[in-house]
Image (cartoon, helix red, strand yellow):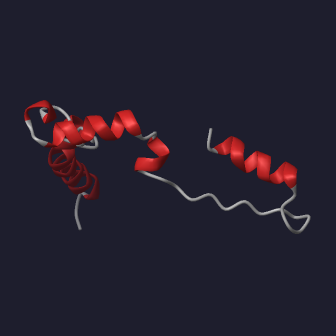
Amino acid sequence: MARPWLWTAAALVVLLALASPVTRLRLSLDTATGGIEQQSAAAGREILEREFNEGRISPIQVVYVSEDGPLDDGDLEAVARLSE
């Protein structure tokens, strides 16, 4: 292959041209909350936000392991503080 640097430069220019749209790419999570006020689901969402805390709407599970065996009162208090 004659002139490998020329082919390398040409390939690099092509790859950069193909990758250029990535510089304008915006990643985000669409929760569709922008126009929800006009939808019938808005009333339900407002009730959920007012009546339930975030942990009840979308709960997570926490696994707490003690190296000392079964959980004692101190361990249970530490777990309770996680949910505050």
Picture quadrant where residue 26 is located: top left
Residue drawn at the location 89% of the way across and 68% of the way down: 69
Answer yes or no: is residue 25 visible.
Answer: no
Residue 50, image x and y in percent? 36, 33
Left or right: 45, with 55 as reference point: left
Q: Quadrant of the C terminus?
A: top right
Answer yes or no: is residue 54 visible.
Answer: yes
Number of disc labels: 0
Residue drawn at the location 15% of the way across and 45% of the way down: 17
Does residue 21 lie above or below 2 as drawn? above
Left or right: 3, with 75 as reference point: left
Nearest the eye: 49 or 21: 49
Picture quadrant where residue 33 is located: top left
Q: What residue occupies the far right of the structure in this picture?
A: 68
Residue 43, image x and y in percent? 19, 37
Residue 1, image x and y in percent? 23, 68
Residue 8, image x and y in percent? 26, 54
Residue drawn at the location 9% of the way across and 38% of the way down: 39
Nearest the eye: 17 or 68: 68
Nearest the eye: 10 or 42: 42
Residue drawn at the location 28% of the way across and 52% of the way down: 5
